[in-house]
Image (spheres, rainbow, N blue to C red):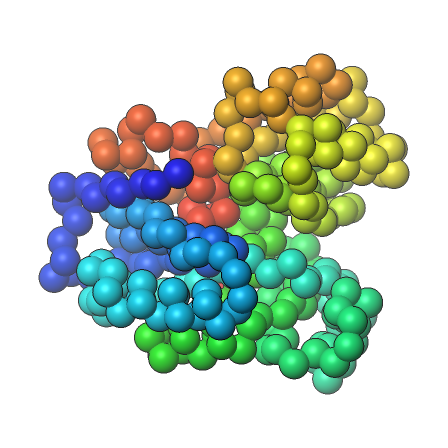
Amino acid sequence: MTKNIIETDFQRDNTSAYQLSILLGMDSLVYSIYDKENNKLLVLKTVPLGSGQSTDQSIALKKILEKEDLLQPKYGKIRITYTSPNASLVPSRLFNENESEVYLSELISGPIEDSVQVDDLDSLKMKIVYQVENQLLETVKAKFPAFQLFHISTPFLLGCLKTFPGLSKESAFACFNNESFQLALFNQGELLLYNSYACKSASDVLYFVLLAYEQYGFDPNTNPLYLAGHIVNDSDIYKILYRYIADLNFLPVPSFVQFGKGAASEDPNFYFPLHSTLLCD
């Protein structure tokens, strides 16, 4: 889905006071611009990136970064979120920075040739170790010498915690994007499970959700599941989840973002991980 929202109060000559967030997906680039003072969303745009080999994606990304008009000014803060299929959560107390590659060894066959990055999730006492393709990373560095990089799970998890501080009840969260989704289970603010799944059908989604519920003793009749991302209430995924999860809800509007008139008709949680990059530091 292509979006191009530019609020009337966006000022190109004031970008040093703005925050730029970019979400690099497998086939698209989505970016948003916020006022640093009040976190108001000023710009939201999607740009097709194409799919295929990493070299092809790097070339497409380089062209976008060079030609996309609103990516040319200098911004006060730049956060980039990367969708990497190879990621591992490690408890902070067990993490050894000298052995970062070891945490990915079970996910990757053969030697690790791409860059290994680590996100700190202090509020959850966790580290996220993930792989970033070297060519994509170098392309981004060439365009933005100063930026913060995060795995897609980081804003998602922080956004869940921010939306429901404390999470006193056992709760599950799912965030959808094209043919995959992220799933997290919490109990009183403690992360019990995080994983991402490829899904080709609504029944795939139901299988993974119910499996996670069973593994962690969640009751589909009482433990809520909150939805965000690319999902609507007339979709096959929503309909099948509604049949099996009694307490099924869409996430409320993020309290940490202000939305203007241009975005008034949009579902604010459609780009939940992108908006949640505001919580990443």
Percent coordinates x, y for residue 100 in the rendering: 72, 77
Asked if 57 appears above or below 277 in the picture, the reply is: below
Q: Is residue 198 left or right of residue 164?
A: right
Compared across the picture, whether 116 is left or right of 147 comes to right
* Along the viewing direction, whichever of 139 and 170 lies nearer the viewer: 139
Q: In this view of the protein, can residue 40 be seen by the observer?
A: no
The one nearer the camera, 149 or 92, is: 149
Q: Residue at x 57, y 70 (%)?
A: 132
Q: Is residue 79 left or right of residue 180?
A: left
Percent across and percent down for residue 220 are: 78, 23
Q: What's the residue at 53%, 77% (across, down)?
A: 134
**Residue 5 position (above or below residue 131):** above
As drawn, the residue found furthest toward the bottom would be 98
| Front in this rendered view, residue 241 or 50 | 50
80 w.r.t. 210: above or below: below
Which residue appears at 46% of the width and 35% of the height? 269
Name the residue: 21% across, 44% down.
6
Residue 175 visible (yes or no): yes
- Quadrant in which residue 86 is drawn: bottom right
Q: 122 or 130: nearer the eye?
A: 130
Instruction: Indicate the position of residue 28 as horizontal and vertical percent values.
Output: 43, 53
Residue 71 higher or lower than 45, as above or below: below
Q: Quadrant of the N terminus?
A: top left
Q: Quadrant of residue 176?
A: top right
- Residue 129, position as x, y percentages in the image: 67, 68
